[in-house]
Amino acid sequence: MNCCARRRDTAAYFARTVLYRAHRSSNSSPAANPPQPTRPAAPDMDSERAPQALRRLQQEFPLEARVASLPANLLRAYGTILQSWAKGEPPGIGIENAALVRELAGLDAILIEDDFASCYPFSVRDTGIRVTVAQKSVNAMCAIDALAIPSILVGVGEIEAACAACGTRHACTVGPDGVVRSGDGQVVIAWSGRLAGSSCCGRSLCPQIRFQCPGCSVPTGGSQLSIVDGAAVGTAFFAFQRRLLQTF
C-alpha cells in the first residue's frame, strides 16, 4: 500500500471515529465515560456516508498531499500563513516572501484575495459563513470547512450561516473533537457540484458546499450531508493542519 492510500485509510477511519463519538455522546448519560472506540460508527448511523464524502473531497482537492510534498521553504511559508489564521489574524501577502506566496497560490494551497492570503479552510472574503472560537471570529470557505475550524483551533466553535436556498439563519456548535454539540437536524449541508478541472477550489468547489435547511431542495445532481457527517469529514480532512500548527 502506498503512502497516499495509507493517508486515505487513516483519514477515513478518523472520520468514522468522530461519528462514533458523536453517537455515543448523544446517547449516553452525563456520567458515562465511554472508552476510546476501536471500531467504526454505531450500526444505526450512516457509517458509509462520511468516509465516502471524505474520499471524494480528497480526490477532487488533495490538499494534504500537496502540503506534504512541499519543500522546506514553502512548508515554512505555508505554516506561517496558517499560524496567522489560527490567531484570528488574516495575513497580508507580505507576511512571507512574495515569490513563495505566489508559488503556494499557484499550487492552490492558499488563495490570494485583495492583498491577503486565504488559507483553506479560512477565507478573507465574507462568504456568509462565520465561525467563532475563543472570541476569534473568521470566515470559512464552505460549510465543511466551517465545521473543521473548531478542531484546528482546538476549541468550541459557534458557526453561523444562512440557508443557501431560502436565506433562513442557522447556528450550530462543534467541539474541538469534531463532535456536533447543537444544531444537528436543524441544518444540513448541500453539496451541489465538483471541482472544475484545474480551477481554484475556493472559487469553484467551495461555493457549492453550503449550509441549507433540511426541507429546501438541493440543486440537480447535488447531495446532502448531515452536519454530523460534515464535521467528521472536515475534521479528518484538515487534521494535518492541527498537527502542523503544533510544530510552530
Image (cartoon, helix red, strand yellow):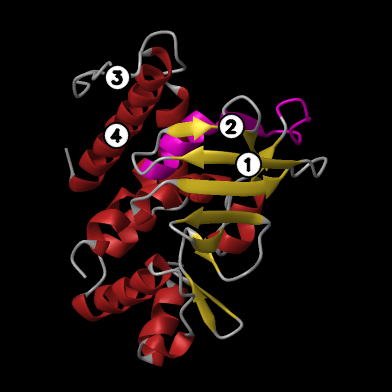
Inter-mark Cα distance, 1 to 2? 6 Å
Q: Nearer the viewer, mark 3 or mark 2?
A: 2
Write down the region rendered in magenta. 214-235
Tag 1: residue type? Ala
Q: Nearer the viewer, mark 2 or mark 4?
A: 2
Inter-mark Cα distance, 2 to 4? 22 Å
Marks 3 and 1 close (CB-CB < 8 Å): no
Is residue 224 a member of the stretch shown in magenta? yes
Q: Nearer the viewer, mark 3 or mark 1?
A: 1
Chain-order first, disc 1 or disc 2: 1
Q: Which residue is mark 1?
A: 171
Inter-mark Cα distance, 4 to 3? 9 Å
Instruction: Give the label on residue 183, or none.
Output: 2
**Image point 48% across, 61% down: which residue?**
135
Marks 1 and 2 close (CB-CB < 8 Å): yes
Question: In this view of the protein, can residue 192 be seen by the observer?
Answer: no
Inter-mark Cα distance, 4 to 1? 25 Å
Q: Which residue is mark 4?
A: 14
- Taking depth in this image into account, of 48 and 126 the one nearest to the observer is 126
Instruction: Give the label on residue 106, or none.
Output: none
Chain-order first, disc 3 or disc 2: 3
List the single residue furthest toward the right: 166
Q: Secondary structure at mark 1?
A: strand
Is residue 11 a member of the stretch shown in magenta? no
Whether 113 is drawn above or below 209: the answer is below
**Mark 2 neighbour density, 10 Å: few (under 14) some (14–19) many (20 or more):** some
Instruction: Give the label on residue 40, or none.
Output: 3
